[in-house]
Image (tube, rainbow, N blue to C red):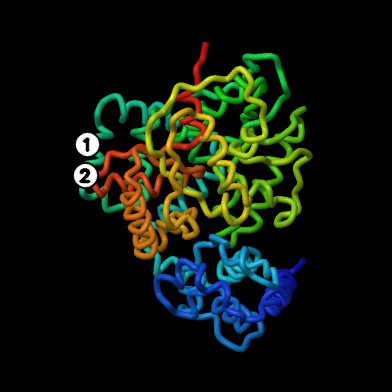
Amino acid sequence: MEKSDQNYSLMEELLAEANRCVACGLCLPHCPTYHLTHSEADSPRGRIALINGVASKHIPLNEKFVQHMDRCLTCRACENVCPSNVAYGRLIDGARVMLRENAQPVREERQGRESRLRNFLEQELIAKPARFDRLRPILRLLVNSGLLTLLLRSDTLRRNTLIRSLLFLTKRNLPGQIWRNSYPASHPQRGEVALFLGCIARLIDTETLLSTLVVLNRLGYTVHVPAAQTCCGALYQHSGQMSAAVSLAQQNLRVFEKLNIQAIISTASGCGVQLAEYSSRLGVEFPVPVVDINQFLDAQEWDGVDFVPLPQKIAVHEPCTLRNTLCASNHLYSVLRRIPEIEIIKLPGNDRCCGAAGTYFLDQPEFARALLDEKIRAFEQTGADCLVTANIGCALHIASGLMNSGRNIEVLHPVTLLAQQMRIK
């Protein structure tokens, strides 16, 4: 298909979906950016009207339009309350394809160096996560030599949101894990599953991934970890790079369809949404379901598994991807209640995004910081000893905010807490 034909087809799709919006305004109170600006253009209804105007060529695709599209976190809270079931996620992704093709120079000039660094990382590392393996010796040297601690104190590096966040999480998760292709069940086998590693997580969130292996093996599942798996593609799809997202999806399909498994397990809800929507969004369909680890564990029989009591207050953060799209946040609480004496507290404001939103915290630091400050204040109200969340991006963002506020608080994945408290004989 010629580029002009593709552009025409995209405009037709955008108009068809945008015209389904009845402009009722029920989405406005649920939109994080409208909450911050009280501007109609920063609400789902306003953005849909703008997309309609540009797609129908009634208004120009200018810098103001780019600004309002880029301010959207794609949290999709609006979809849950829309009486017309407008597929807002499809709309905003389509609008960003349009921006990628027509407004990229404007974006890059406005977003500056940090965005260019992110683009470089996306192209050279995230899309080729096997390259992360080559970084492990360097990161181990940084951690073991004490250089990482010095880097975290550097004012120059602390001002760079991306570098500061990555260094902080790396300090907590000592890199060096070499993934095996398979981890056999330690008890009578119930079945076989595969673990999706992700890209950044496979390097700096090994704590969560290893905890998942421990728990699944203990429950009787052999876990396959295919080496050729790659990034889920979410970062590319949400920045308008649909062909790159499709390519990554096809590679993952080729890898996982060879396995004799019951499910593909995801520990990061952001990746989980992308994998689960491959069929409807990218035309790629896995032969088995993609299941969030919390939902999978909640459906299991736990006979013979004991936990050490944990007499602590644990605040639970619900990622937007788990709450709004997978609709599975209730499983967070169910699995944590298996730990005796634990006091579980819902983080106030769980219905509003924390501001991480993939790479949003890099491209829109002012908005991301405002939303993060709300989360930090909400956590302080709980008096909790620890915070758990089910998405690596949210964990990185919130942990960085707690650290900057002088709070020495652990931010863990629920499966990590389960593994820590599980009695292993």
Q: Quadrant of the N terminus?
A: bottom right
Q: Where residue 44 sits in the image (x, y, percent)? A: 56, 73
Per the image, label 2 sits on a secondary structure element best described as loop
**Does 15 sit above or below residue 237?**
below
Report which quarter residue 410 is drawn in: top left
Residue located beneath label 1 in the image: 150
Q: Nearer the viewer, residue 315 or 190?
A: 315
Q: Position of residue 378 (x, y in %)?
A: 36, 54
Res. 154 mark: 2
Which amino acid, by three-letter code, is at mark 2?
A: Ser
Query: Can residue 265 be seen here?
Result: yes
**Mark 1 Cα shell of 10 Å, populated few (<14), some (14-19), many (≥20):** few
Q: Is residue 139 left or right of residue 33?
A: left
Residue at the image position 35 percent from the left and 42 percent from the top: 384
Q: Residue at 46% across / 24% down in the picture?
A: 421
Q: Is residue 131 visible?
A: no
User: Where residue 343 is drawn, which disc sits there?
Assistant: none
Residue 83 screen position, x and y as percent: 67, 72
| Up/down of 306 relative to 99, above or below | above
